[in-house]
Image: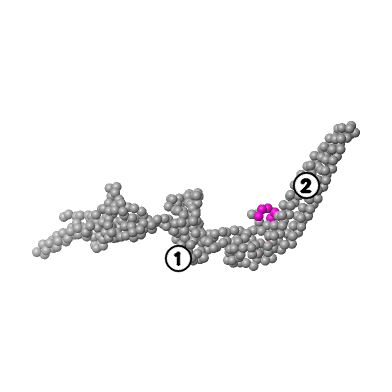
């Protein structure tokens, strides 16, 4: 009797175990997660191009000097605002005064030589005319007449050399005067000192070349207008145009943004790390633009288009089925594929022009989440 009861228990356990595997119970009550859905809704779709850039001033120059000598005064510091024509740096003028006097003396010497050459030329011309008369009268030989002609040609050459020396000495004198004037460096425009390259007590050497190769003293910029030089990928440059609205953010001011607009677009791209980019100049129009400093790295969002009151779905809701684009719309408790006509996208949401209605629920998760799991089935 006991043995029959035991067999009944064994058979019942086997039946339960078979049902466990047949119906797919695996001990995890969350194995069939519900589908994730969102409602189709209307909103404004903002299409933007995102790029990086650098804050730059309106005008920035490096002020140099052709003069040499000891710096006797440089009372300004980085960040100080200076006015146009204001004396910023003073040099000891003794060295340049000496050079100017020497250059002036060279002008006087070359002028005297030129005048001497003119006198010699007149003398040679007179002697040649007299020689021609004497030669016709047979008083002098042909050789003497030829010597007079050669003397005249030499005098003409000496005159040209004298004129060249005067011109050379005059230009040297002008440059010496410029170097003397450069012992007092004045601000070329009203702006702010960005960097000091020298300081009082330092001795700098003069240069005899052009002004562009003078000794750098300081750099300054006009900060009345602030710009951002943004680097836009060639893929997006066709969407950029002048006067588009721009939002600028910098790492040093988290949570803050600055308004701007596109002012210029480079006509030619440049290759950086195998990627072609275009420089886009953005002027900052925000009232708090003084918080932006030259050299700051910025994140730029350029508004290229706005679709007002667009019917939007998340991009993850879009599916492709049998070559058609659509979404799965919840019809009761089950999803149903509906073909749609997508429009513009900002990379997160997509405009739907037809196919769904405002308020309908579309599936954003994988449809496999709602499918029953297939388990191994055991038969007894």
How far is mark 1 from mark 2, CA to CA?
70 Å
The crowd level at tag 1 (other Cα within 10 Å; few <14, some 14-19, many 20+) is few
Q: Quadrant of residue 185?
A: bottom right
Q: Nearer the viewer, residue 114 or 375?
A: 114
Image location of residue 300, percent across then percent down: 45, 59
| Residue found at x 45% / y 59% | 246
Q: Is residue 108 visible?
A: yes
Q: Nearer the viewer, mark 1 or mark 2?
A: 2
- First-in-chain label (1 vs 2): 2
| Residue found at x 62% / y 60% | 188
Q: Is residue 52 visible?
A: no
Which disc is residue 162 wearing? 2
Q: Quadrant location of the N terminus?
A: bottom left
| Residue found at x 80% / y 39% | 153
Dot 2: what SS?
helix
Horizontal side of residue 7 vs 64, given as left or right: left
The crowd level at tag 2 (other Cα within 10 Å; few <14, some 14-19, many 20+) is many
Q: Is residue 266 magenta?
A: no
| Residue found at x 42% / y 57% | 303
Q: Quadrant of residue 346?
A: bottom left
Image location of residue 376, percent across then percent down: 22, 54
Type of colouring = one colour
Instruction: Specify the farthest residue to the right.
Output: 139
Q: Which residues are magenta?
A: 204-211
**Which residue is tagged 1?**
256
């Amino acid at each position: 009797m006991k043995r029959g009861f035991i067999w009944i228990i064994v058979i019942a356990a086997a039946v339960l175990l078979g049902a466990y595997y047949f119906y797919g119970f695996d001990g995890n009550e969350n194995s069939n997660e519900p589908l994730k859905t969102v409602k189709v809704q209307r909103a404004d779709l903002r299409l933007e191009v995102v790029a990086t850039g650098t804050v730059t001033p309106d005008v920035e120059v490096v002020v140099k000097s052709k003069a040499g000598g000891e710096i006797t005064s440089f009372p300004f510091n980085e960040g100080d605002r200076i006015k146009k024509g204001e004396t910023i740096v003073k040099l000891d003028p003794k060295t340049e005064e000496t050079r100017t006097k020497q250059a002036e003396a060279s002008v006087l010497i070359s002028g005297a030589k030129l005048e001497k050459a003119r006198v010699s030329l007149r003398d040679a011309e007179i002697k040649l005319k007299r020689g021609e008369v004497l030669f016709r009268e047979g008083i002098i030989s042909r050789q003497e007449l030829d010597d007079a002609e050669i003397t005249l040609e030499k005098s003409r050459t000496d005159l040209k050399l004298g004129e060249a020396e005067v011109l050379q000495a005059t230009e040297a004198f002008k440059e010496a005067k410029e170097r003397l004037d450069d012992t007092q460096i004045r601000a070329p425009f009203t702006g702010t000192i960005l960097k000091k390259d020298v300081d009082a007590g330092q001795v700098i050497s003069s240069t005899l070349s052009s002004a562009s190769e003078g000794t750098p003293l300081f750099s300054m910029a006009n900060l009345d207008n602030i710009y951002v030089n943004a680097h836009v990928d060639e893929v997006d440059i066709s969407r950029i145009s002048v006067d588009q609205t721009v939002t600028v953010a910098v790492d040093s001011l988290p949570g803050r943004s600055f308004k701007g607009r596109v002012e210029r677009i480079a006509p030619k791209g440049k290759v950086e790390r195998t990627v072609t980019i275009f420089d886009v100049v953005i002027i900052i129009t925000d009232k708090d633009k003084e918080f932006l400093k030259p050299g700051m790295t910025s994140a730029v969002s350029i508004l290229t288009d706005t679709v007002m009151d667009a019917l939007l779905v998340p991009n993850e809701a879009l599916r492709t089925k049998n070559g058609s684009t659509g979404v799965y719309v919840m019809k009761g408790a089950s999803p149903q594929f509906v073909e749609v006509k997508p429009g513009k996208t900002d990379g997160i949401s997509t405009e739907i022009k037809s196919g769904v209605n405002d308020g309908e629920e579309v599936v954003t998760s994988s449809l496999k989440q709602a499918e029953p799991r297939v388990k191994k089935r055991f038969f007894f």
